[in-house]
């Protein structure tokens, strides 16, 4: 029975559907990723409001659903029902198309994000180039939106955004190149631009690139981590939409659904750039210490993590149920939260069952379909976990730091990050030659 | 811009050359931008017209009056007692200071003096209000520069001050705490203890704000050498309060011409050296600590006795005029009252610190970027209720 399902899921093969030429399964993966990212954006929306609130000694959303869990849905409904205003003076068509450009750019990136060795839509041999190229198209949406609004604040926001993204792209690219250089440190001496290939190179070399040639990898990662905040227009580099200066920057004139498309694009882009960072420096889908803590026992222990995570979430939700005031006013909320906890607990149970059923116990090394399935879940889990850490950092930065000024941002980009990333690139090359 | 009859953008804008030719689409060379009256960072309904070259500010023009309520004219139609609550509505962030200035001005006009205990209560409440005002300034100023979190910390701690106000006189913001001749209310039971508790509560909190900002790299870059105003310029423009002191002028009315009971307390006047936004920040942070010192002394030495001087039921000051000013949290708050011997002022003029300090905006922001305009508006610490009156 599992074999039968596996054959349809296409994950029996160790290659991606795109590489296998299976357009149907590629399409299915695309839908799964689109839905997954949309849900992740909604969850991120809720989490950001909640985490930010707790940083700021507030409660955050509490009214719509238990602990505001339904707030993103309420927001989505509200935004969809809002009047769709296109200013009379705006360039109608460009105004209309701008959010779509941004959205398209940030979602197209997901085709090459390696959630696992075969858990990706496609394994492009120029994956990282494709990713950088497409993700920087997002700025086009912003610039076009600012220009088409025919209004001053959006125009300034768009100008800031374009200058900022263009200048940070350079440092970002150089940091990426130093990571790609590291992939060529093998017997054949050929590197790879494929996202999956880059993660596999880390697997073969037995080290995450963040720790490679310490501290070179770390510095390159640091530069990328800074540049990616600027790239996605997040605090402290959120000049393009600096609320206190430009009211809302490039999307000042946007409302309702169109505005929410910008938000969707922004959060999707955040997840996308975090994924690049994870794939390039943090070992992608690999679990921690795959070479130190190896063997079936360790595999089993680590494969319990997805289930335990959901169990933990369920426990947190249950704590919320217990701590809710016993007034009858909260009855529905309590039932709702308990139901939510039950769903989480059910997922946890399912994952734990899969972990137990998918133990790769036999010594021959051949994997049963269940084991393959379990492995796939592990890959996706660790990848998503690492990305989630970045998402938390994005929120943390926003709660902590003031906003940089535009000229200071440019100064840091060109005068600090670019030289450092150049030096790191050259140093990586030299060390790489010396080592091999 | 030209079709609205309510539009005043073309009137008397001497700083800006608004003669831009009609263009079908955006003119990319110089931008004239309206910042406000509805803008998240103009602290109310201030409208600043900016002339920009890219992001660089070539000139500014403040348009005020969106919150004009004619307070000074109202004063001419109210008795001295009736007008007292109106002053709370000017600088609603520091209503106690406004009340103190007005009551003392009328007292001076009538030649009465509040009893010692009333003076001490006045000092305690005014200094508490100074801390509250500075906390609100810090929160909003940091928010303008992009740090969201301090706002919530300062509002949390300001709440404790407002609670004391509420217990004392029943109101939190527009307190109407003082009366001409003293105070209406005796302190409530446990007032001293609560104030002392507040002192020990808030001192570490001020350190907490500083921890978030003072050594923060971004904060320093955003505020150092931004909105610099020299001491001479500041004096020439009539700037007072922390803005003046940050430029290195040691001028504090509490020391220069002591009123209430300030001559009896020991405190320092914090001053800056560069006159930039960072110095103004440091000066205000230090002022909060000095206020704590004053409150501590006052609450420990508060004398017993009456809280109201002998003041007739109907207040009829003799014919004459008086100017009395106090050091409000934002600067010199002065009241000029002309009395014709009747129960109502013949003319009352307020010298609001925010209004005068706002004049320095243009000097401070020329040549800076748009982001700095927001920072400088925040650092001047204006309250539009006081600017427009």
Image (cartoon, grey):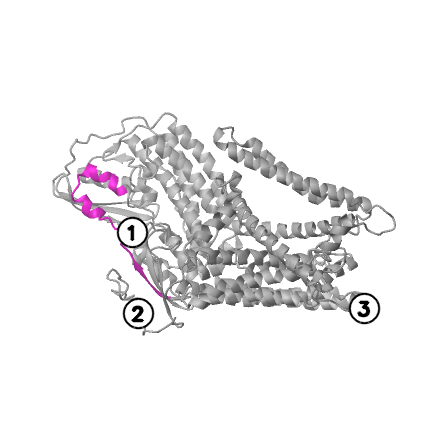
Instruction: Please indicate whether residue A205 sits to the left or right of residue B153 in the image.
Output: right
Residue situated in front as seen by the camera: B160 or B34: B34
Q: Alpha-carbon neighbours of circle 2 within 10 Å: few (<14), some, or many (≥20)?
A: few
Instruction: Please indicate whether residue B339 sits to the left or right of residue A374 in the image.
Output: left
Q: Quadrant of the C terminus of chain A?
A: bottom right
For numbered disc 3, what is the local secondary structure?
loop
Q: What is the chain identity of the residue bearing mark 3? A: A
- Identify the magenta region: B58-87
Q: Which residue is mark 2?
A: B18
Residue B132 x, y percent position in the rendering: 39, 41
Residue B122 x, y percent position in the rendering: 31, 35
Tell which tag, 2 or 1, sits nearer the viewer.
Answer: 2
Q: Outermost residue toward the right?
A: A364
Tell which tag, 2 or 3, sits nearer the viewer.
Answer: 3
Q: Which residue is mark 1?
A: B387
Q: What is the chain identity of the residue bearing mark 1? A: B
Q: What is the chain identity of the residue bearing mark 2? A: B
Residue B92 x, y percent position in the rendering: 32, 44
Q: Is residue B84 magenta?
A: yes
Q: Are marks 2 and 1 on the same chain?
A: yes
Q: Which residue is mark 3?
A: A188
Specify whether residue B226 is in view.
Answer: no
Give me the residue at 50% from left, 32% from top. Answer: A330
Tell which tag, 3 or 1, sits nearer the viewer.
Answer: 3
Residue A200 x, y percent position in the rendering: 75, 60
What is the CA distance from the residue labelled 2 to the residue labelled 3?
Answer: 68 Å
């Amino acid at each position: 029975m599992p074999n039968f399902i596996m054959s349809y899921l296409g994950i029996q093969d160790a290659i991606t559907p795109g590489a296998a030429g299976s357009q149907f399964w590629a399409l299915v993966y695309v839908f799964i990723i689109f839905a997954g990212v949309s849900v992740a954006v909604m969850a991120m929306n809720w989490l950001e409001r909640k985490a930010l609130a707790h940083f700021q000694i507030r409660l955050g959303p509490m009214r719509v659903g238990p602990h505001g869990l339904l707030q993103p849905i309420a927001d989505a409904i509200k935004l969809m029902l809002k009047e769709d205003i296109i200013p009379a003076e705006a360039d109608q068509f460009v105004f209309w198309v701008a959010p779509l450009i941004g959205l398209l750019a940030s979602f197209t990136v997901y085709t090459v994000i390696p959630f696992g060795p075969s858990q990706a839509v496609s394994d492009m041999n120029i994956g990282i180039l494709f990713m950088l190229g497409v993700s920087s198209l997002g700025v086009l949406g912003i610039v076009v939106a600012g220009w088409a609004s025919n209004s001053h604040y959006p125009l300034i926001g768009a100008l800031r955004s374009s200058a900022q993204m263009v200048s940070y792209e350079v440092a970002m690219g150089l940091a990426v190149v130093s990571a790609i250089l590291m992939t060529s440190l093998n017997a054949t001496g050929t590197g790879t631009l494929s996202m999956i290939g880059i993660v596999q190179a880390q697997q073969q070399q037995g080290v995450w690139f963040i720790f490679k040639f310490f501290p070179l990898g770390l510095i390159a990662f640091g530069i990328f981590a800074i540049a990616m905040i600027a790239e996605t227009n997040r605090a402290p580099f959120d000049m393009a939409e600096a609320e206190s200066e430009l009211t809302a920057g490039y999307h000042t004139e946007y409302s309702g659904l169109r505005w929410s498309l910008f938000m969707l694009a922004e959060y999707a882009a955040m997840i996308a750039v975090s994924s690049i960072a994870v794939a390039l420096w943090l070992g992608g889908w690999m679990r921690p210490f795959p070479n130190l803590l190896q063997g079936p026992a360790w595999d089993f222990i680590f494969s319990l993590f997805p289930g335990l995570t959901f169990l933990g979430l369920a426990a947190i939700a249950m704590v919320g149920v217990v701590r809710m005031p016993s007034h009858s006013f909260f009855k529905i909320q309590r039932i709702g939260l308990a139901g939510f906890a039950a769903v989480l607990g059910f997922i946890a149970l399912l994952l734990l069952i899969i972990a137990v059923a998918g133990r790769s116990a036999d010594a021959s090394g051949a994997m049963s379909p269940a084991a393959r399935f379990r492995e796939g879940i592990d890959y996706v889990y660790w990848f998503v976990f690492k990305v989630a850490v970045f998402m938390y950092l994005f929120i943390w930065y926003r709660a902590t730091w003031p906003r940089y000024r535009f000229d200071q941002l440019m100064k840091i980009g060109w005068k600090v990050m670019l030289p450092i990333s150049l030096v790191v690139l050259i140093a990586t090359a030299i060390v790489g030659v010396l080592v091999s | 811009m030209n079709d609205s009859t309510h539009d005043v953008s073309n009137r008397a804008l001497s700083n800006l050359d608004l003669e831009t030719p009609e263009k079908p689409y955006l003119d990319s060379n110089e931008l004239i931008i309206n910042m406000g009256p509805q803008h998240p960072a103009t602290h109310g309904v201030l409208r600043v017209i900016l002339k920009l070259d890219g992001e660089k500010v070539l000139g500014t023009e403040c348009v005020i009056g969106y919150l004009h309520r004619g307070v000074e004219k109202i004063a001419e139609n109210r008795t001295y007692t009736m007008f007292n609550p109106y002053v709370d509505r000017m600088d609603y962030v520091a209503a106690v200071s406004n009340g103190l200035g007005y009551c003392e001005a009328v007292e001076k006009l009538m030649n009465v003096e509040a009893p010692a205990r009333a003076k001490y209560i006045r000092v305690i409440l005014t200094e508490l209000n100074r801390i509250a005002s500075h906390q609100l300034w810090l929160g909003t100023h940091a928010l303008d520069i992009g740090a969201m979190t301090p706002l919530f910390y300062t509002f949390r701690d300001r709440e404790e001050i407002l609670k004391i106000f509420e217990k004392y006189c029943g109101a939190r913001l527009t307190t109407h705490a003082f009366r001409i001749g003293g105070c209406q209310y005796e302190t409530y039971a446990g007032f001293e203890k609560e104030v002392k508790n507040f002192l020990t509560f808030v001192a570490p909190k001020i350190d907490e704000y500083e921890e978030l900002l003072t050594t923060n790299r971004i904060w320093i870059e955003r505020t150092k050498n931004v909105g610099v105003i020299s001491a001479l310029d500041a004096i020439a423009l009539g700037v007072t309060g922390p803005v003046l002191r940050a430029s290195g002028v040691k001028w504090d009315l509490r020391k220069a011409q002591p009123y209430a009971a300030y001559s009896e307390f020991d405190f320092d006047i914090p001053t800056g050296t560069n006159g930039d936004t960072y110095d103004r920040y440091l000066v205000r942070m230090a002022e909060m600590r000095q206020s704590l010192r004053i409150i501590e002394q006052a609450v420990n030495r508060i004398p017993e006795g009456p809280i109201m001087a002998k003041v007739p039921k109907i207040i009829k000051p003799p014919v004459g005029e008086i100017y009395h000013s106090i050091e409000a949290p934002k600067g010199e708050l002065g009241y000029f009252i002309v009395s014709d011997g009747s129960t109502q002022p013949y003319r009352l003029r307020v010298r609001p610190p925010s209004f005068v300090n706002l004049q320095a905006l243009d000097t401070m922001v020329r040549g800076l970027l748009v982001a700095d305009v927001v920072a400088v508006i925040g650092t001047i610490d204006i309250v539009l209720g006081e600017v427009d009156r």
